[in-house]
Image: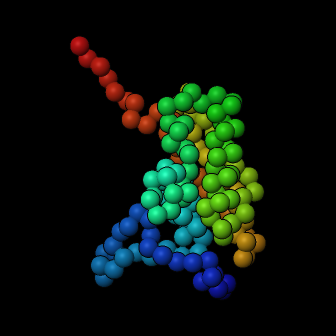
């Protein structure tokens, strides 16, 4: 069995408690990296006062029309964010799948863990029309 303790471990995200012993659930290795990627992409850049460069600019795309230009901007933004925010990986590829007329975008990330040279995938769901299912009745 491969020792991957050098990849890190920490509290799982979202924070939950184990049912049996009421201890915090921990994550390690690739699971920890995937949770870190998810947290990094969900955090708006500048929202952490002690780490102002932590996070991504994905929130700026929430109410934009997802055309070819916006898709390329999202790919570049995700690649840049992961390059600067997750030092344990090298990003190989980022591609998008746009569904529901641009309302839902899935970001497919292929990366290589630097320490093990193992390739992994992560899918990040991103809704560009979040909070817009409002109905006006009169």
* Rendered location of residue 10, percent (x, y): 48, 76
- The residue at 63%/82% (across/down) is 6
Query: Which residue is drawn at the image coordinates 50% and 62% (left, top)?
Result: 51
Q: Position of residue 88 (x, y in %)?
A: 66, 70
Q: Is residue 10 above or below residue 72?
A: below
Residue in the image at 43% along x and 37% along y:
130
Number of numbered discs overlaid on the protein picture = 0
Residue 115, position as x, y percentages in the image:
72, 76
**Residue 96, how many percent across, how many down?**
65, 42
Q: Nearer the viewer, residue 101 or 131?
A: 131
Among the 4 quarters of the image, the one containing residue 111: bottom right
Q: Residue at x 61, y 35 (%)?
A: 98
Q: Which quadrant would the C terminus be assigned to in this image? A: top left
- Is residue 107 at all visible to an observer of this figure? yes
Is residue 134 positioned above or below 33 on the image?
above
Q: Kindly tell me whether residue 38 is visible in this rendering.
A: no
| Residue 42 drawn above or below residue 126 | below
């Amino acid at each position: 069995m491969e020792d991957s303790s050098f990849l890190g471990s920490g509290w799982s995200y979202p924070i939950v408690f184990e049912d049996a012993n009421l201890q915090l659930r921990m994550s390690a290795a690739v699971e920890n990296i995937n949770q870190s990627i998810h947290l990094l992409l969900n955090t708006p850049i500048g929202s952490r006062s002690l780490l102002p460069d932590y996070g991504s600019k994905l929130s700026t795309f929430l109410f934009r029309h997802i055309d070819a230009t916006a898709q390329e901007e999202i790919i570049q933004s995700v690649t840049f964010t992961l390059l600067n925010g997750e030092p344990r990986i090298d990003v190989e590829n980022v591609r998008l799948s746009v569904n529901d007329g641009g309302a839902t975008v899935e970001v497919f990330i292929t990366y290589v863990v630097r320490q093990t040279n193992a390739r992994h995938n992560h899918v990040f769901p991103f809704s560009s029309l979040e909070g817009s299912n409002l109905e006006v009745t009169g």
